Amino acid sequence: MKSLAELQAIKNKMKDRVVLRDGMEGARVVVGMATCGIAAGARPVLNAFVEGVNKEGLEGKVTVTQTGCIGICQYEPVVEVFEPGKEKVTYVKMNPEKAQEVIEKHLKGGQVVSEYTLGAVAV
Amino acid sequence: MKELSLNILDVAENSVKAGASLTQILLTEHDGVLTLEIVDDGCGMSEDIVRSVVDPFYTTRTTRKVGMGIPLLKLACEQTGGSLAIESVTQEANPVEHGTHVTATFNTNHIDFTPLGDVSASILTLIQGHPDTDFLFRHQTDGGTVELDTRELREVLEDVPLNSYDVMEWIGGNLQEQYEALSADAGMSGEE
């Protein structure tokens, strides 16, 4: 059972990790979660990033957050990746499979997946 | 929207944006009628704004950013013969008890009823995006009730964020177990 006692155990385990994470300057993945994004399928994309980042052990280096309408509704689901000292990368028309690829190649490997970026999709 | 749970996610976001400290998402299923209530203690809306968010054609330039969220929910309930109501009290009108109460009813046996879909995923998404806001989720069916109150979790977690991965996993598992415990004849639940 997922009891409150189990939650208490998670809390005790997390306490130390929270301290570790403070002050880390990592990548930020921002998923557009306004009406346009949600209708286009942003919820599973966000979920894929949250799960994938954890599965790949990137949780100390990458934070996944949500934002409102980015203004390019026709390209939703839109995901922006901000990395310190680098230009913002905008991924468009995302899905969970593409998200997985971005985690592996971009967030882990450091290579932007150009074919999914706004520059490649918008002509 | 393909699932009502996506409308729920979308409209509940408005509550968070209105500065709510607690957003309640209440689902009640009984006798072929599903009632969805989204209740917040945010800044509230004036009568004029309430009118404009319900009908997109009343929207003027100044309220343009209100958007399509409420009209889409209105469509989803009215196409089943149900209805949408919004009550709101602004902070100016009542500094103590203010906020917005959205009520949507659906006839679940209507052919145009949009399936509820994965409500748990929407609750998790809200918590992931707004770990410092509280949510009360309650889904009442004839087969039992599923309930989650982040205020209770916060008491246990203290300063550990609600959107830590392990905590989110616990919440997801907890909701799943509660849904599985509902009796089989409860009709549709949050599971797909």
Image (cartoon, grey):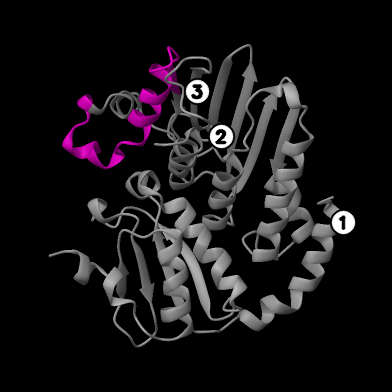
Residue B82 is a magenta residue:
yes
**Which quadrant is home to the C terminus of chain A?**
bottom left
Any part of residue B43 in sight: no
Residue B70 shown left or right of residue B113 in the figure: left
Query: Magenta segment, principal secondary structure?
Result: helix
- Chain letter of the residue carrying label 3: B
Mark 2 falls within which chain?
B
Q: CA distance from mark 3 to mark 1?
A: 35 Å
Q: CA distance from mark 2 to mark 3?
A: 22 Å
- Disc 2 secondary structure class: loop
Residue segment shown in magenta: B57-86
Left or right: residue B102 versus residue A22 is left
The residue where tag 1 is placed is A5
Residue beneath the point at 48% across and 53% down: A44
In the rendered image, the residue lying farthest to the right is A5
Observer-nearest residue: B14 or B27? B27
Q: Amino acid at mark 2?
A: Val
CA–CA distance in space, label 2 to label 1: 35 Å
Q: Residues within 10 Å of mark 3 (few under 14, many from 20)?
A: some
Residue B89, percent across and down? 46, 28
What percent of the width, then of the height, locates residue B81? 42, 12
Q: CB of mark 3 within 8 Å of CB of mark 1?
A: no
Quadrant of the image occupied by residue B67: top left
